[in-house]
Image (tube, helix red, strand yellow):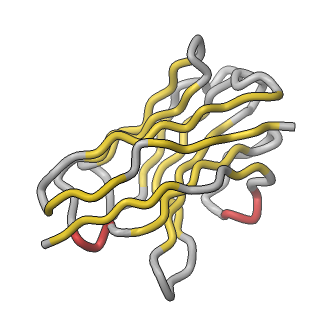
Amino acid sequence: QVQLAESGGGSVQAGGSLRLSCSVSGDPINADNRCVGWFRQAPGKVREWVARIYTGGGSSGIQYYADSVKGRFTISQDIDKKTVELQMYSLKPEDTAMYYCAANSGGFCSTISSRFPYWGQGTQVTVSS
């Protein structure tokens, strides 16, 4: 079992920055093939994958990004603090959404939300123009 809790959301103007943090507890964050992903969901839209990082096993540290955030967002891990962070730069109004972190239970690190059994409660990010 893994428990996750997001923090760091807020309201910023376009072009601004925010840093989201996902605290991971329960099963070890660095278990083999563990990965943590960030997803977001805007009102009336489907939940979409944003970024993911392997936090355990031989692929630990490998990151992947959705095209919409590549070059603007950076995902990172701190194994000692048991956190996964999402640094967001050059924010746009279309980045406005509820942001969730999620953890897999091992195996392939997917971009599909249904493949992640563990979820945090979400943190709101609002970007005004």
- Residue at (15%, 61%) from the top-left corner? 13
Using the image, determine if residue 54 lies above or below residue 112.
above
In the foreground, 121 or 79? 121
In screen coordinates, is 16 left or right of 3?
A: left
Using the image, determine if residue 92 lies above or below residue 74.
below
Residue 128 in picture, x, y percent from top left: 19, 70
Residue 40 in picture, x, y percent from top left: 49, 64
- Residue at (62%, 27%) from the top-left corner? 55
Tell me how many marks there are. Answer: 0
Using the image, determine if residue 106 lies above or below residue 55.
below
Q: Quadrant location of residue 85?
A: top left
Q: Where's the N terminus, which quadrant?
A: top right
In the foreground, 60 or 87? 87
In the foreground, 128 or 75? 128
Q: Quadrant location of residue 95?
A: bottom left
In screen coordinates, is 106 left or right of 110?
A: right
Residue 56 in picture, x, y percent from top left: 68, 24
Residue 15 in picture, x, y percent from top left: 12, 56
Return the residue found at the far right: 1
Return the residue found at the far front: 10
Using the image, determine if residue 91 lies above or below residue 28.
below
- Residue at (58%, 11%) from the top-left corner? 80
Q: Where's the C terminus, which quadrant?
A: bottom left
Return the residue found at the far bottom: 44
